[in-house]
Amino acid sequence: MAGQVGKLAYVDRKLGAPSNGQQTTRVLYDTFSNVTATPQSQIEFFTNFQGKGLGQTNLQVSKLDSAESMVIKSLWFGGLFEAVDPSIPFPFNAGGVVCDIVVGNQTVVKALPLHFNTYVGESFDRIHGSNNGYASADASPGQWCEVRLLTNIVIPPQVDFKVVVRGANLGNGDTGATICALSGYGQIFSAGTTF
Amino acid sequence: MAVSAQDKIMHVANKLGLSSLKYMQASTGAIYDGNTTASDSHTFFANSVQHANPAVTNISDNRFEVNEALLIENIAFYSLSGTDGQAINLSDIAGNDGAVIVFDVVIGNKVVMKDMPIWKIGSPACFATGGLNLNTAGATPVLQQKPRHQVYMEGVGILIPPQVEFQVNARVFDAASNAPVSIALGCYLFGTKVNLNFNTTL
């Protein structure tokens, strides 16, 4: 299996994209503000940036800069809910919750279930739990779920991408937010000697 | 040197004459199916078209599309709460503490895993802790370690090729008396996935 550095260089080369940027660890994140009394059946991340600040997302468009690219190694989702039943953590679902990742016009991760890596305690990863629950002193829970991907998924420069989460009762129609973060290895723009 | 997941997929694809599989999208995937009705005998994936999607299952046919495949690297069992199919840890169902699930995995007309046991109190091949989880059985948010009910495949895994029917058959017994035990049960298969990628074919 090609390593993440090799895979990124391979895809960039195929696309004619620059591959001399600063190599680094990178996390892209986007936040959906839950709508009170309106549970969601689908949440799209990295498509709507209107009115969002750095606390909610670190992108301004749904694509990376022309000299930037990234390998997704891990999907992370978090939910911040207030005054909900803390015994049912992220994504406060009724039944299964699945996730799609679309890069360009291609679905690169298709209907990947997330809920097993939460309270169910049957996480995909043998070594890591990735299914922790946290109950704060005031019983307002913060919950998260992480899925480590088995294959390197590349987001090339200047290509639209989005993450779609589907299920019932997402966000629980409560206050707070639902967060998606894509964690991995990437290249960021480096002026170097090119200027 | 160990065989990688990609090596295994390509080896099986070559044996089956699937010459275009190598051009498809490599990914990570999992499929799941469950029965919300308690029973001592379950068949998963074969009847998934009749189950709510994505509440109870995420597939509509027990065959993958053309040029899609899944290398099974992890098989897990869980229980389901209520009719909405909310997945819960087997330790969160009341009673039946001596329950043992015995399952087979069938691909095509071949049994590829046979009489595999998973006990309600836990199972082998799961050395690592699952981390602290919120107990969904109680009214108060109690953090606890839960047992895993999984089989991590030794070696690389087993490939479900495109367009071949597959299913998991499970029966539930009491380990002490061998009597049948009725519970709602679900199953997922997780591993390296191959997704259809049209590339330049359209």
Image (spheres, helix red, strand yellow):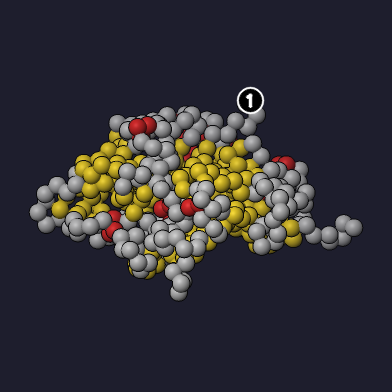
- Amino acid type of the residue tagged 1 in the rendering: Leu
Q: Nearer the viewer, residue B123 or B110?
A: B123
Quarter holding the C terminus of chain B?
top right
Q: Is residue A193 above or below residue B78?
A: below
Q: Is residue A153 above or below residue B131?
A: above
Q: What residue does disc 1 label?
A: B202
Q: Is residue B66 above or below residue A68?
A: above
How far from the left and from the top, in percent, is residue A191? 84, 59
Q: Nearer the viewer, residue B90 or A4?
A: B90
| Residue B35 position by quadrant | top left
User: Residue shown at 40%/58% (left/top)?
Assistant: A88
Which residue is the extreme one toward the top?
B202
Which residue is the extreme one toward the left?
B177
Which residue is the extreme one toward the front?
A37
| Residue A84 position by quadrant | bottom left
How far from the left and from the top, in percent, is residue A91? 47, 54
User: Residue shown at 24%/61% (left/top)?
Assistant: B121
Q: Nearer the viewer, residue B73 or B119?
A: B119
Q: Is residue A101 visible to us here?
A: yes
Q: Is residue B189 visible to us here?
A: no
User: Residue shown at 34%/54% (left/top)?
Assistant: B88
User: Residue shown at 40%/43% (left/top)?
Assistant: B55
How far from the left and from the top, in percent, is residue B25? 56, 39
Q: Nearer the viewer, residue A147 or A162?
A: A162
Instruction: Tell whether B39 sits left or right of A75.
Output: left
Under tag 1, what secondary structure?
Answer: loop
| Callout count | 1
How far from the left and from the top, in percent, is residue B118? 26, 54
Residue density around tag 1, few if under 14, some if 14–19, many if 20 or more, within 10 Å: few
Task: Please give the chain letter of the residue carrying mark 1.
Answer: B
Which residue is the extreme one toward the right?
A195
